[in-house]
Image (spheres, coloured by chain):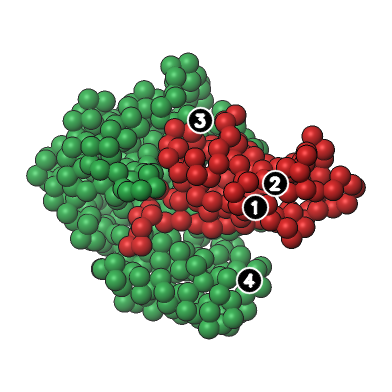
Chain colours: A green, B red
C-alpha cells in the first residue's frame, strides 16, 4: 500500500502578475512578501517574467543575490518555469536542434539559481525530451512537462510522453500536473468580469450551459473537437450581439477551464514531479467554486505525492477588484484543510520541505 | 491580459511632426522583437502612417520590418517601450485621445492555424508635451 503523501505548500510568482506588472513589487520585494505572508516554503518563478535578460544575460552577481535572498527569507526554490518558444521565428518553427539548444540555456539557469525542476511545455515531443535528458543529467535538473488544458492526464500526446519516460526510466523526466486541466465549472469570477463589461445574464447563462455541456461530454480528444468547441463560444457570442467577447469566451472556455475528470491524473501519477495548483478564485464560503481543490489534494495525498504544489492564481487576468494575496491565502487554507481531511498534512516548514523535496525528486518515478 | 495598461499615462510627446507614447506589454512575460508583429498609433482619430512607425526598446530603435528577425532584444514586462510615428499634434493644453493597437505573437502556443497571435488595444486621454 502506498503511504500517504505530504505535499509541500508553495506559490508561483505568476499569481501576482498584476501587482508586479504594476511595479508595486520588484522581484526582491515580491519574494520577501511571499515569505512574510507564509505562502511558501515552495517558490516557483517564471524565467521570462521575473528575470531580466533571461536566459542569456543572467550573470553570476544576480545568481548570487538571488540565492542569498532565498536563503535569507528561508524559501525553497521548487520550479523555474521555462518556455518552449517554438514559434519565436516569424518564418518557420524552430527545428529540433535549435529547440534543444534553446531549452538547454534555460535549464542551465534553473540549475545556477538553485531550482531542482524546470517546468517545460507540451510542444516538446517524446524525441525532444529524450534529446534533453543529457542536459537534465548534466545540470541535475528534473524536467517536468506541464500537462495543461486543453490537454489532460489521459490525452494521447501526454500518454506518448509517459510511454517514452517509461522506456528511458530516468527520475529526471516527469510531468507538472496543472489543475486547470480538471476544472468542474466556468469560473464565477470570470462571469462577474463579463457582467462588468455589460454581458447580460441571459448570455452568461448560455456560456455556462455551453461549458457544462462540454464538461458532460468530457475533454476533447482531437484537435478537431477542440476547434469546434472554440468556434461554438465565438458563435454564441455573435448570436447574442456581443462578438467582441467571443474570442475571450473561447480562449478561456477551452484553454483555461479543462473539463477532464480528476481520475485522468492517475494515468501519469507516478511521473508527476510538480503540481500547479491552478485556481481562479475563492468564494464567500472560503472555497474554490470551479476547481475541485479538496479532491485534487486528497488524490495527491492518497497516491503518495510529496512534491510541491505551487498555488497558481489565474484569475488575475480579469479580476481587478480583489487582492491576489488574500485570494492565495484563502486557497492555501483550503489545501491545508484538504490534506488534513485526507489523513496527512501540507508541509509548511522550510527545512522539512527541503528534505522531503530532495527525497521526492531522487526516488525512481515508479517507486 | 492587461490591455488597460498598454498606454503609460502622461507620456505623449511631440516634436517636429513626430509623436511618441510609452507602452507596456499587456502580457505576463518578456517577448523578443520578432514577436512584436505590428502596432498602430492614433491621436484624436488620426493614425500615424504605418511606414513611419518606429519601436524603441532597450535603447535601440527599430522599424517593424527590422523587428521581424530580432530575436536578441526582448521587451521585459517591467519596461516601457516607445512607439513613435509621423503625426503632428498641436502644442496646446487640450486633452488628446491616444489609441495604441498592438499585435503580438505568443511563441509557445502553436495552434492548427500557426503561432497564436493576440491583438490588443488601449485608449487614454492626456495632454501632449513638447520635447
* Front residue of B55 and A302: B55
Residue at label 3?
A52
Q: Is residue A136 visible?
A: yes
Do badges 4 and 3 share one subunit?
A: yes
Residue at label 4?
A195
Residue at image x 58%, y 57%? Answer: B120
The chain containing the residue under callout 4 comes to A
Residue B86, disc:
2
A5 horizontally vs A127: left or right: right
* Front residue of A331 and B8: B8
Tags 4 and 3 touching, CB below 8 Å = no
Tags 1 and 2 touching, CB below 8 Å = yes
Residue at label 1?
B49
- 10 Å crowding of disc 4: few (<14), some (14-19), many (20+): some
Tags 2 and 3 touching, CB below 8 Å = no
Label 3 secondary element: loop
Residue at image x 23%, y 41%? Answer: A96
Do badges 1 and 4 share one subunit?
A: no
In the rendered image, the vertical position of residue A99 relative to residue A195, given as above or below: above
Residue at image x 81%, y 44%? Answer: B128
Q: Whole-percent x and y of residue B69?
A: 42, 40
- State the CA–CA distance, disc 4 to disc 2: 39 Å
Label 4 secondary element: helix
- State the CA–CA distance, disc 2 to disc 3: 31 Å
The chain containing the residue under callout 2 comes to B
Quadrant in the picture for residue A88: top left
Q: Earlier in the sequence, mark 1 or mark 2?
A: 1
Amino acid at each position: 500500500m502506498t503511504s500517504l503523501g505530504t505535499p509541500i505548500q508553495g506559490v508561483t510568482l505568476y499569481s501576482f502578475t498584476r501587482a508586479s506588472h504594476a511595479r508595486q513589487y520588484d522581484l526582491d520585494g515580491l519574494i520577501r512578501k511571499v515569505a512574510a505572508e507564509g505562502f511558501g516554503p515552495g517558490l516557483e518563478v517564471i524565467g521570462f517574467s521575473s528575470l531580466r535578460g533571461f536566459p542569456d544575460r543572467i550573470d553570476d552577481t544576480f545568481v548570487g543575490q538571488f540565492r542569498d535572498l532565498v536563503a535569507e527569507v528561508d524559501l525553497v526554490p521548487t520550479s523555474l518555469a521555462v518556455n518552449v518558444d517554438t514559434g519565436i521565428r516569424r518564418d518557420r518553427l524552430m527545428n529540433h536542434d535549435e529547440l534543444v539548444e534553446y531549452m538547454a540555456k534555460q535549464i542551465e539557469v534553473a540549475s545556477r539559481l538553485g531550482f531542482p525542476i524546470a517546468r517545460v511545455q507540451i510542444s516538446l515531443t517524446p524525441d525532444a525530451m529524450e534529446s534533453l535528458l543529457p542536459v537534465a543529467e548534466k545540470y541535475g535538473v528534473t524536467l517536468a512537462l506541464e500537462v495543461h488544458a486543453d490537454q489532460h492526464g489521459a490525452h494521447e500526446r501526454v500518454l506518448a510522453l509517459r510511454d517514452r519516460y517509461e522506456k528511458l526510466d530516468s527520475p529526471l523526466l516527469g510531468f507538472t500536473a496543472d489543475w486547470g486541466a480538471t476544472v468542474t465549472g466556468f469560473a464565477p469570477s470570470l462571469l462577474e468580469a463579463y457582467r462588468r463589461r455589460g454581458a447580460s445574464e441571459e448570455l452568461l447563462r448560455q456560456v455556462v450551459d455551453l461549458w457544462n455541456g462540454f464538461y458532460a461530454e468530457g475533454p476533447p480528444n482531437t484537435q478537431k473537437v477542440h476547434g469546434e468547441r472554440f468556434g461554438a463560444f465565438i458563435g454564441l457570442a455573435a448570436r447574442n450581439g456581443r462578438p467582441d467577447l467571443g474570442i475571450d469566451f473561447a480562449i478561456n472556455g477551452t484553454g483555461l477551464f479543462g473539463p477532464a475528470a480528476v481520475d485522468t491524473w492517475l494515468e501519469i501519477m507516478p511521473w508527476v514531479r510538480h503540481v500547479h495548483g491552478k485556481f481562479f478564485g475563492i468564494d464567500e464560503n472560503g472555497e474554490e467554486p470551479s476547481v475541485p481543490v479538496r479532491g485534487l489534494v486528497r488524490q495527491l495525498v492518497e497516491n503518495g505525492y510529496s512534491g510541491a504544489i505551487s498555488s497558481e492564481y489565474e484569475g488575475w487576468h480579469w479580476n481587478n477588484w480583489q487582492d491576489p494575496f488574500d485570494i492565495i491565502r484563502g486557497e492555501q487554507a483550503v489545501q491545508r484543510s484538504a490534506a488534513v481531511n485526507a489523513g496527512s498534512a501540507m508541509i509548511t516548514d522550510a527545512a522539512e520541505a527541503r528534505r522531503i523535496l530532495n527525497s521526492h525528486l531522487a526516488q525512481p518515478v515508479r517507486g | 491580459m492587461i490591455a488597460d495598461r498598454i498606454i503609460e499615462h502622461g507620456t505623449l510627446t511631440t516634436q517636429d511632426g513626430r509623436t511618441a507614447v510609452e507602452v507596456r506589454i499587456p502580457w505576463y512575460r518578456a517577448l523578443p522583437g520578432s514577436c512584436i508583429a505590428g502596432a498602430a498609433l492614433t491621436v484624436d482619430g488620426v493614425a500615424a502612417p504605418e511606414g513611419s512607425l518606429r519601436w524603441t526598446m532597450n535603447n535601440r530603435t527599430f522599424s517593424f520590418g527590422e523587428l521581424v528577425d530580432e530575436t536578441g532584444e526582448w521587451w521585459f514586462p517591467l519596461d516601457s517601450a516607445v512607439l513613435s510615428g509621423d503625426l503632428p499634434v498641436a502644442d496646446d493644453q487640450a486633452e488628446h485621445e491616444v489609441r495604441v493597437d498592438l499585435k503580438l505573437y505568443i511563441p509557445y502556443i502553436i495552434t492548427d492555424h500557426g503561432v497564436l497571435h493576440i491583438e490588443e488595444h488601449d485608449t487614454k486621454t492626456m495632454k501632449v508635451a513638447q520635447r
